[in-house]
Amino acid sequence: MLTVPTALYEDRRPAGGGGLRRPTGLFKGQRNYLPKFIQSVLSSIDLRDRRGCTMVVGSDGRYFSRMAIEIVVQMAAANGIGRLIIGQNGMLSTPAVSCIIRKIKAEAAGGIILTASHCPGGPGGEFGVKFNVANGGMWFSICLNNHDFFPLILL
């Protein structure tokens, strides 16, 4: 495991819908942009709830999803997540992720959904990350300002 100190990206404030939506090129091109947001999400979960828990990961299959899922898997493992439920080829809709979280509620810490919802995807389009909390609902009340300077924890 490797801990990497990082600096704040000013535009990393969540969008509506419990997540972050930005141009795909930003996620791909700016060093550690996605891992830093994923670390902020994981750090918002109490360590006692995070260690050994189950998380659900899904995407709408848009451009960059496969690489993003690999990053989420690495970050989850480095943060002690015990089990991931990932849709076939990474595909799970937002309602499906919510449903799975609710079905396994005793062991789930939440779910990460890779989607920019209705926005167009592709290299010149949008990419997004949403987080559903342990009850399957959207992530509203967590303030990322408290987690801006968490170092990355990588395998």
Image: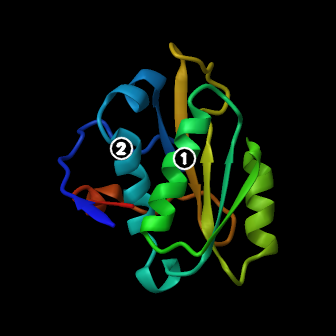
Instruction: Please name the amino acid that badge 1 sits on.
Output: Glu
Question: How many C-alpha atoms fall within 10 Å of the one at disc 2: few (<14), some, or many (≥20)?
Answer: some
Give how far across and how far down residue 108 sits, in percent: 66, 74
Q: Tell me if 57 is positioned left or right of 15 in this view.
A: right
Q: What residue is shown with label 1?
A: 70
Give how far across and how far down residue 129 sits, in percent: 53, 43
Q: Tell me if 56 is positioned left or right of 2 in this view.
A: right
Q: What residue is shown with label 2?
A: 13
Give how far across and how far down residue 78 sits, in percent: 42, 66
Give how far across and how far down residue 79 sits, in percent: 43, 69
Question: How many badges with numbers are in the image?
Answer: 2
Q: Which of the two residues, 47 or 120, is positioned nearer the viewer here?
A: 47
Residue 131 drawn above or below residue 30:
below
Instruction: Please name the amino acid that badge 2 sits on.
Output: Arg
Question: How many C-alpha atoms fall within 10 Å of the one at disc 1: few (<14), some, or many (≥20)?
Answer: few
Residue 49 drawn above or below residue 117:
below
Q: Secondary structure at mark 2?
A: loop
What residue is shown at x 49% (from left), y 66% (from top)? 77
**Quadrant for the N terminus in the image:** bottom left
Q: Secondary structure at mark 1?
A: helix
**Quadrant for the C terminus in the image:** bottom left
In front of the other: label 1 or label 2?
1
Residue 82 drawn above or below residue 28:
below
Residue 17 visible (yes or no) = no
Q: Quadrant of residue 148?
A: bottom left
Q: Tell me if 60 is positioned left or right of 33 in this view.
A: right
Q: Quadrant of residue 154?
A: bottom left
